[in-house]
Amino acid sequence: MPLLTDSTDYAFAQAHFAPERLWDFFEGDRSSLNIAHECIDRHAGDPTRLAVRVAHADGRDEALGFRQIADGSSRFAHWLAQRGIGPGERVAVMLDPSLAFYVAMFGAMKRGAIAVPLFTLFGPDGVRLRVADCAPRVLITTAGKAETAAGIPGVEVVVADDAWQAELAALPNSWQVATRADDMALFQYTSGTTRELPAAVKHTHRAVVVLMLAALYGTGIRPGDEFFCPSSPAWGHGLAHGTLAPLALGVTTGTYAGRFDPVRLMQALQDYGITNLSAAATHYRMMRTSGAAHQFRFAIRKLSFTGEPIDAETLRFIDATFGVPACSMYGTTEVGVVLVNYPGATDFRVKPGSLGKPVPGLRVEVQRADGTPCPPGEIGEIKVLRRSAWVPTKDLGKVDEDGYFHHAGRADDVIISAGWTMSAVEIEDVLLQHPDVREAAAIGVPDALRGQVVKAFIVSPRAGDAAFARELQEFTRARLSQHEYPRHVAFAAELPKTPAGKINRRALRDAEAARPPANA
């Protein structure tokens, strides 16, 4: 029986996949499984084997070996034990990718504690909300971030400095893991505002087995790949698909630390000889708008994206720059990856702008409000069949005649005007095709006659005047339906983003709702 990594072809995946075969990649089983052992320790026999390459924003490159992380994380497990921090207790880690980050995260899971990675750009309110929610015994961070977390009751804030490293160095570099597959391993927070905290998504050690679906068919990782994911490991994509999945397969992964710079990213892609890139849609868009891609030589053979749809102009940039199709990987933190484009599969046609087709063995449908499936072309909610029940994704979509899924925005991003249903995503995609538009967001705003009308927010280097607004309206009407255009256009220096880098339409809607009426 061939291994599931023996081919990237779509037909091979359909013929040979079975859920139980995902366990073939691991030493553990349902009675004894530990993420840190599977991702790090079992690959640490060769002291020269590279686990992670970190491209720092300041130009530094950091290379971390499996043995180096294995030794450090074992020492950290002993460090936790000395403090009486045991299985099931939370250990928060607010660090950029670095040796200290991987030592603390994997060391917590070795101990049987629950690792909680936190985004380093959270402000005091964001940190306090999450810390209050998960109640960690200790928070590992930098000196610069320690003040942000200082004074939170019940949590010890520890700075990962030279003194801390010296403290760890005096401890044993081996640890015997003792966790079961269904023991809790990770809490991961989705992005959100500090006014409304999303619930932590809780992952057991078994989650690393499920991640193989995304690794095999969403990012297309195979032994021998030079892989890179610039998303922060504080977020689902960077943690699950950029860190745990490649390491579990023994593949070296690359990541980015510090303030994001698309030119620095492209430099790393060239210098590291990256052949498999998985990034957020925003990363590709920023590479395009930097205008610097022509300065670099790339070796990309597989390329995937997630987070939100990519506009048509950026898809054209990817095709011209990397010469491989942009493969969407769609899912949510709660349900995992469910729709993919099988990167590297020579027998799978990637439709530009589509979400692809379901991962092997999974049933996905677009459904109406009454739960019946939508016919091709009709917009409904994307749902996934899990344990004989349909699980909503809260995303809108449609299926075409060939069985490919297409995204139509979040369920609360649909705009209904005078009985017409419009997708914010489609309107934004057209606006982004205008040469003077750098960023665009569309929302529905109240209208006495039509119920709602479209309002577009535009970031542009061009002066935002009435003539430019009319030009954008006509530009959109000419490419969509006559009714499907922004009746209101506002210009902004920047658009609100979630911490994960997505445009935050909800913040725009909230700001509009708070505005006084025009005749007030």
Image (tube, rainbow, N blue to C red):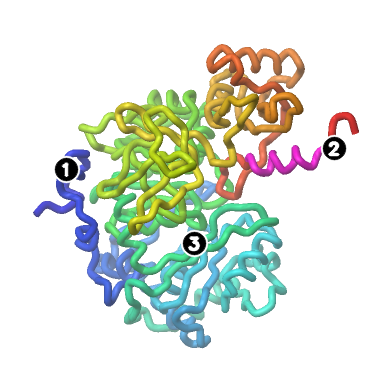
Q: Earlier in the sequence, mark 2 or mark 1?
A: 1
Q: Position of residue 156 (x, y in %)?
A: 62, 78
Separation (CA) of disc 2 from disc 1? 59 Å
Q: Nearer the viewer, residue 126 or 160?
A: 126
Q: Give the residue pinned by disc 1.
A: 12
* Amino acid beneath label 3: Val
Q: Is 513 in the magenta?
A: yes
Q: Is 395 in the magenta?
A: no
The residue tagged with tag 3: helix, strand or loop?
A: strand
Separation (CA) of disc 3 from disc 2? 37 Å
Q: Nearer the viewer, mark 2 or mark 1?
A: 2
Magenta stretch: helix, strand or loop mostly: helix
User: What residue appears at the point 24 percent right and 36 percent down from the top-left corner?
Assistant: 345
Q: Which residues are magenta?
A: 505-515
Q: Position of residue 228 (x, y in %)?
A: 39, 46
Q: Nearer the viewer, residue 288 or 24?
A: 24
For residue 181, side relative to residue 425 (left or right): left
The residue tagged with tag 1: helix, strand or loop?
A: helix
**Does residue 75 appear anywhere in the picture?**
no
The residue tagged with tag 2: helix, strand or loop?
A: loop
